[in-house]
Amino acid sequence: MTEHIKELLKKAKQLVEAKDPEALPILKEILSVPEQSEETANVKINAISSLGEYYSKLGAADQIRQLLKDLRPFFQTIPKARTAKIVRNLMDQVSATLKNDQLLIELINESIEWTKSEKRTFLRQRLESKLAATYFKTREFQSALKILGQLTREVKKLDDKPLLVEIFLLESYIQHALGHLPKARAALTASRTAANAIYCPPILQAQIDIQSGTLHAEERDYKTAYSYFYEAFESYSSMDDPEATKALKYMLLCKIMTNNADEISSIVSGKLALKYDGKDLQAMKAIALAHKDRSIKKLEDAKGHFLHELSEDPVIERHLTDLYENLLEENLGKIIEPFSQVEISHVANLVDLPQERVERKLSQMILDKKLNGILDQGNNCLIVFDEPPADEVYPASLDTISNISKVVDSLYNKAGKLS
């Protein structure tokens, strides 16, 4: 009997790969086998995985929901740890292929209610962590933090460090997305501390390194960020994980932001990086070229041409915005330098940008005291003032008063000793 269902499973897997509907009755036949031996249970678990993969490829959320309900009697016959693994694998398959996040949230909530009724704490905690991650994906940050707050207190009592690593890392993602960098760093430190106490899988360690690099980059510490991104890249690359491309992009971004764009060609031509050559790396090369030429126009062209690769990544987008602003300030500074008064329209033509954009940037530079001048709105021009000469009398006077104070204090102490 066992050999027969093994053959059926082998055939079904081939059909699932081809998205052939003939796989469905075969997999259901395997699950309906009444035999409950250990070997049969293993075959059934593989069949469940294939069935979940088939439904996920079709985007059939209702069928997956029904499958989870139909499998509940089978879950009673196998160990709870294996049940947890099956349900988590099904959820991972669904989240990887299903585009409707609200359906996924409903699916997870239904499974959580079942785990509560069955008192399956281990599985419930992992499903709640998955639910929080899904809320983060849909940018429902407060809902995610509410779940994580309750879950953290519960898991700390059980001292379940592998789950604590995931929870704190997810909290760090959420706090970073909200702009709370101190809280994001604190959560990441807690995640790293928990990870150091256990064996941490390479992929999870790489995720921690990516987040560490991201937070250091937010603080403009690009050298430290680069080292973390490099560690993550090596880990992802060794596991042939597609996230390696993202880590490599972040490495190149750090080189650009530290004015080391010349090193990018040697990095992308390295042995590890060659297999990831594609539009993502071409986008970063275009940014590096624009930065090298100090050209705002080339930077805008690169962002327009590689919109998906650059603008859809919030980390890249944030730092490219800073890079754009810095380049614009440098270019405007060089253009304005020889003038005492210049028309804003002339500056806009030279920098090849809309006049309104240039005027807004000039006013910002004046307010930030990066430019000594005023905007004459009536004549539509910029008036630049000469830098006032440094007043050397005032600091010299302060030094003199400070020294006199020290002399007086010294004389007072000596007079006190004589008396």
Image: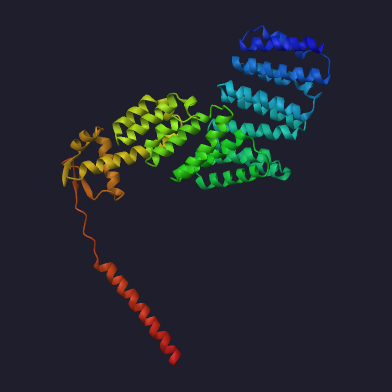
Q: Residue at x 61, y 43 (%)?
A: 191
- Name the residue furthest front: 271
Whether residue 167 sits left or right of residue 178 in the image: it is right
Quarter residue 418 falls in: bottom left
30 and 11: which is toward the camera:
11
Q: Residue at x 36, y 81 (%)?
A: 407
Quarter residue 13 falls in: top right
Q: Quadrant of the N terminus?
A: top right
Q: x%, y% of residue 152?
A: 66, 42
Q: Residue at x 26, y 35 (%)?
A: 356
Whether residue 291 sits left or right of residue 20 in the image: it is left
8 and 239: which is toward the camera:
239
- Name the residue furthest top: 22
Q: x%, y% of residue 49?
A: 69, 19
Q: How is the image coloured?
A: rainbow
Q: Residue at x 65, y 27 (%)?
A: 108
Q: Quadrant of the C terminus?
A: bottom left
Note whether 3 is above or below 232 in the view shown. Answer: above
* Residue 229 visible in the snapshot: yes
Whether residue 223 sits left or right of residue 146 in the image: it is left
Q: x%, y% of residue 97?
A: 58, 21
The total number of labels drawn is 0
Note whether 161 is above or below 123 in the view shown. Answer: below
* Residue 110 visible in the snapshot: no
Q: x%, y% of residue 123?
A: 72, 32
Quarter residue 41 falls in: top right
261 and 82: which is toward the camera:
261
